[in-house]
Amino acid sequence: MPSQLVCRPERDLPVAVLRVSGTLDRETGGALGAAVRRSLAVQPAKVLLDMTRLRVGDPVALAGLGTVVCQAEEFPAVPIVVCGADPRTRDALATDRDCAGLEFADDCDKALTEAEAEPGGPTVRVRLRPVPEACRQVRHLVTQACTTWQRGDVTATATLVATELVANVVRHAHTTMEFTMGLRDGRMVVAVRDGSRLMPRALDPAVTDMGGRGLRLVRDLSDAWGVLPVTDGKVVWTQLATGAAL
């Protein structure tokens, strides 16, 4: 009989809660990974992963749990808190090198209350249509946000990076997009989510090749960047180091 795993996103913002129940094994691991990526793509302050009703079905699934759960490399700006895991599962995650930044909590409801009480960094969210005017809109938004947040040291770079990310959607994805920008732990995170599953590449093109230049510029200007694939598209994200408020 096939294993069953239910991943139920209970809420998304400002703190995401993903409740998981059923059996995790080699067949259902992909579903858990997709659900975690979906919660991360919303870009909440934290993702609470409730494993109270999760059973790990076999040693292979337990060994690979860190790869499934820990998406830090794909979207490092959003912390993940594992709630209610049994001792064996918790130990496996705690000793996994890919899960160095993972947090743990015994009770998900208590962890949610604590997470909501934490002061969150300022964030800008806006939906944009895939038209050239979106580039002008996002330049204005970024300049205004950097002024409000007193982050003049990164205004020029953040504006250029944001414009290139939005322009990439206009040129290639042709879908409505969600632009997000925020401050977290001394970093400015700029991200664009679109509805295309075509993965971008930051190429080093020849002079005659017009593809890949925008993301190559994003890569060169950012302290970190990446792509988070989700079932209905992707999130292209970047991080810029920023100093104290000016």
Image (cartoon, rainbow, N blue to C red):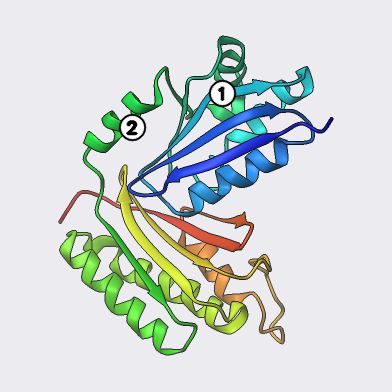
Q: Nearer the viewer, mark 1 or mark 2?
A: 1
- Identify the residue under disc 2: 112
**Nearer to the camera, 109 or 228:** 109
Residue 208 place in picture, x, y as percent: 71, 87
- Identify the residue under disc 1: 53
Name above or below for residue 106 compared with residue 12. Answer: above
| Count of marks overlaid on the render | 2
Determine the residue located farthest toward the right in the rendered image: 1
Residue 167 place in picture, x, y as percent: 50, 80
Which residue type does callout 1 highlight?
Arg
Name above or below for residue 63 compared with residue 2. Answer: above
Residue 57 place in picture, x, y as percent: 74, 21
Compare marks 1 and 2 and give the one earlier in the sequence.
1
| Residue drawn at point x = 55 percent, y = 18 percent | 94
Under tag 2, what secondary structure?
helix
> Where's the C terminus, which quadrant?
bottom left
4 with respect to 95 (left or right) = right
Q: Quadrant of residue 69?
A: top right
16 with respect to 197 (left or right) = left
